[in-house]
Amino acid sequence: MSVEVRREGTVAFVTLSNPPVNAIGLEVRKGLSEALDWVNGQNGLSRVILSGSERAFAAGADAREFDADPVAPHLPDIVARIDACETPWVAAISGVALGGGCELALACRYRIASPSAKIGLPEVTLGVVPGAGGTQRLPRLVGLKAALDLVATGRPVSANRAEEIGLIHGQADDPVMLAQHLDLGTIALEVAISTLPKPTANSDAVEGARALAERKMPNQIAPKRAIDLIAASATMTLEDGMAQEREAFLALRRGDQAHALRHIFFAERGARAPDRIKGAEQPLDHVAVVGGGTMGAGIAYALLNAGLTVTLLETDAEGVTRANENVEKIVAASLKRRLISDADAQSHRAKFLATTDYGAAAKATLAIEAAFESMEVKKTIFGMLQTHLPANAILATNTSYLDVNEIAACVQDPSRVVGFHFFAPAHIMKLLEIVEGSQSSDAALATGFALAKRLRKIPVLSGVCDGFIGNRILARYREAADTVLLEGAAPWEVDEAMVEFGYAMGPYEAQDLSGLDIAHANRRRQDATRDPNRRYIPIADRMVELGKLGKKTGAGWYRYPGGAGKVEDPIVADLAIEEAHLAKVERREFTAEEIRERLLIAMINEAADILDEGIAASAADIDLVTVFGYGFPRWRGGLLAYADTLGASKILEKLKSFAQEDPLVWTPSPSVIKCAQEGSSFAQLFGKGT
Ligand code: 3H9
């Protein structure tokens, strides 16, 4: 039974029971409809208490149903029946009341929440607007400004904040108990929200919300529609507002953006350890981190934040000082942003030690090496870790490119070695690539997945290859960008084209931020193995020779006068012209569409090769890597979800036409050919578990 009903004296209890999070699917809607029939048939009831589980009052409509047509009974009708019910309903909220869950609560006459509850209307994060009265009832209850704050970006509020804005009446550790003993007179003072007057118009708040949505969720349709609907609540009857809301909800739910956002929502939740390694993880308590630079410090902080003890190993006293400073900088910044409390900061400091003494990590069950990208350096470190850590400790390298198998070969038991590729800043970025060496044990891999869960990161398994999944695709992206740069485009034209597509910044501005020297060192490493027949574009090397290393040196692809905003640099454009001349390339103009096409098709083709070679296990994994590690627009669902909107035949056709210019670079991947031949999508051909 998805909804349970019972009566005690004059009190009726309607309890949602659809684990794990009481998503409101068809069975729950049917159960609520029957509960309403039952309530209406009872005599002498003083109240109906609507509750869920400790974890969730209700997480909203069941988004798994959104691909199909809606089936009655519909949630807005249920909400309207609760709102109009003669016996007052009281919402007793524990856990989350989100989306349709919040809308159910808004149908109730009275709302009590536990102090840890989270209440909100996050529908826009799934590409839809609230569809069961959220945009009309909420502003009538809390006013336009507070309603916009909740709906426009979809961020839920705490019980305290909900009480402050009048969304709930009060808090209790046991909301059901309080609801049961509430004075009848207190409930009777409240009227149904549907009978409240329209909220006062507030154009400042509406404009502010529009600006915020544009900044935080550019290109997304749902936030704008949600804001329009809330603004309209000030002028429209509830009935008209509800009709418009329903229309917008149904139209958006069928749209590409909602489809893409649902895909990524479920892909994120599906990012789990494969069955073959489940349960093999090592217990995690004490972790050694090697290297206290930006990456090592970020990793250390993330571990501390997850309650782990961290010993950070450095080579000398200077390194120890730098590590302490780097970690302390993150602690201080987190304190300032109130992400952690004073007590958290103290506990982090107490659990952290930076030292040159590997013996201090003798009890660590896991080590994460985040040292300089040099095979020799790494081999030395792994030798030391082998000597000082327990024989069964997992030894992970955070290398971005280097061969995990070669590193593993330097320890006696290579099965202990695995890659954990974090993304900078490591305490913020959600992606963790877990790199499976040819001998990595189940324990090593499972520990990676357990760690990701502990750090609230998204784990994606990758095989060993140069750059693993993410950096390998990034290399192709940059190569395609450099090619159009050589052949006629300016860096800012390339950047603008990708920003229009939905990236927060284009490839050149991103390089300026990370520093051109890192990619340069990597290119030098690849010199020995690079295919001599493949065109090499040396513009970035020329930049490094000129000391244009990016924002940190005041100039890279752009100039940053006074460390401020970026300015186009004609010298860079001249460099491209010069290199084109040397390479006897005739430059031409590129439209933004042509630039986008080349960069995106290059990445898609590489991703297809990655699937073909078994480096990534599924198309969804590629989507997760590109969205959570490389800024691919979430609302496009990730690289291969986007590719599926183009279709493999079109991709193949484009590859063939580009191949006329450079057959080596644009060789169609066997996976693209297969998808095109079978008329199948990447998602179908490379679903999870294939
Ligand atoms: C809406 O309500 C529209 C209405 O306005 C109008 C209707 C007419 N649907 O995240 P977790 C699953 S739109 C289906 O790992 P946590 C999830 O896939 C909805 N399934 O746990 C996972 O399944 P599995 C607006 C859902 O504790 C399991 O529950 N609501 C839904 O870290 C556990 O989830 C939202 O946008 C759903 N709505 O976080 C809220 N929600 O075990 C979306 C969860 O098979 N949900 N599942 O992998 C969330 O934000 C988080 O899941 C939540 C729990 C905070 C609830």
Image (tube, rainbow, N blue to C red):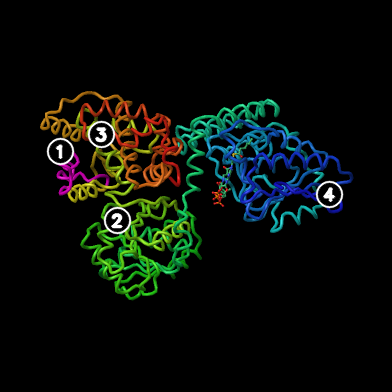
Q: What element carries label 2?
A: loop
238 vs 338, nearest the viewer: 238
Tell me residue 602's x, y (percent). Answer: 30, 35
Magenta span contains residue 531: yes
- Observer-side mark, 4 or 2, equals 2
Q: How far apart are marks 3 and 4 (CA)?
A: 74 Å
Image: 215 above or below 235: below
Is 408 inside the magenta-drawn segment? no
Q: Is mark 4 within 8 Å of ligand 1?
A: no
Whether residue 3 is visible to the viewer of this picture, yes or no, is yes
Residue 40 falls in image quadrant = top right
Which of the two discs, 4 and 1, labels the residue nearer the N terminus?
A: 4
| Screen quadrant of the C terminus | top left
Q: Where is residue 472 in the image (x, y as percent from the top left)?
A: 29, 45
- Tell me the residue that label 4 is attached to: 184
Residue 667: numbered disc: 3
Q: Identify the residue at image location x=30%, y=36%.
A: 669
The residue shown at (36%, 54%) is 422
Mark 3 vs mark 1, CA separation in Å: 13 Å
Q: On screen, 391 above or below 573?
A: below
Chain-order first, disc 4 or disc 2:
4
Q: Calculate the distance from the C-alpha at mark 4 to the C-alpha at mark 2.
A: 64 Å
Q: Which of marks 3 and 2 is nearer the N terminus?
A: 2
- From the top left corner, tell me how far across and down residue 193 is, in percent: 73, 37
Query: Which residue reaches farthest front?
Result: 678
**Image point (49%, 59%), residue name:** 340
Residue ID for mark 1: 533
Q: Distance between the residues labelled 1 and 2?
A: 28 Å
Q: Do the residues labelled 3 and 1 touch (CB within 8 Å)?
A: no
